[in-house]
Image: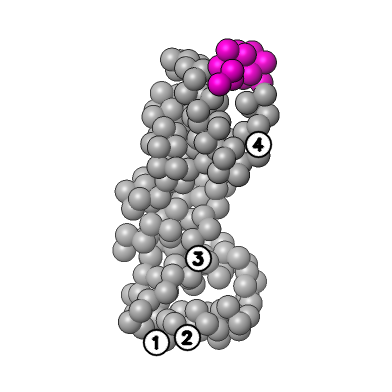
Amino acid sequence: MKLIVIALFLLVSVWANEFDTAVNDYHKGSYIKALNSFYALAKNGDAKAQYNVGLIYANGKGVNADIPQAMEWYEKAAQQDNAPAAYNLAELYHSMQENNEHADERAKFWYEKAAEGGLAQAYNNLAALYLEGKNIPQNNKKAFELFKKAANKGDANAQINVAVMYAWGEDIPNDKMKAYDNFKKALNAGKSEASQYLDRLCKESAWVCKN
């Protein structure tokens, strides 16, 4: 199941000149200068700056990549209801599931926080956790409902995922037309991988694709 690394990036604060300057420095490639400015703001509790410090450490921009440091700053921002930070933190925990039996529980917690903050991608990846069922109980029906939420919010990856479950999912009422509609939405959103699923669906159920 596809995981999405969130693309939200360097949010601008209209009131903090220091923040604006740091954003400009970052875009000019002055990563260390930007990091120093963000760090000063982050220490004073600015959630957006904390998120950006985490982002710089996670991506290794101007510094060696430092995932534990990134997670520390993401969590500080996430505790202040910064949804992108909660999402990125959850995604990092999700990536650790093979080596940490508690990682999925932490990923679940932060995906839920990110979803509360309005990020459709969080519903998609939370659904993936329930579908995988590695360190939290597998629940296909719960995964399906979460995929539907994300798909209805316009997340193209979730549209593919929910369509797959509509077409071929276990313990899910199959609905070929809804599968077709969601594959088409994802394809129209630029997800070319939806075409291979559409081809399979049309071969198996040609009546669905006649329109």
Mark closest to the chain's N terminus, 1 or 4: 1
94 left or right, relative to 143: right
Quarter where residue 77 is shown: bottom left
- Mark-to-mark CA distance, 1 and 3: 18 Å
Mark closest to the chain's N terminus, 3 or 2: 3
- Residue 21 is labelled as 2
82 and 207: which is toward the camera: 207
Q: What residue type is labelled 4?
A: Glu
Quarter where residue 198 is shown: top right
Are the residues tagged 1 and 3 within 8 Å (C-beta)? no
Residue appearing at x 47%, y 23% in the figure: 178
Q: Name the residue under label 3.
A: 9
Circle 1 Cα neighbour tier, 10 Å, few/some/many (<14 / 14–19 / ≥20): few
Circle 2 Cα neighbour tier, 10 Å, few/some/many (<14 / 14–19 / ≥20): some
Mark closest to the chain's N terminus, 1 or 3: 3
The magenta span reads 200-211
Quarter where residue 203 is shown: top right
| SS label for mark 2 | helix
| SS label for mark 3 | loop
- Mark-to-mark CA distance, 1 and 4: 43 Å
Q: Mark 1 points at which residue?
A: 17
Measured along the vertical axis of the image, is residue 136 above or below residue 100? above
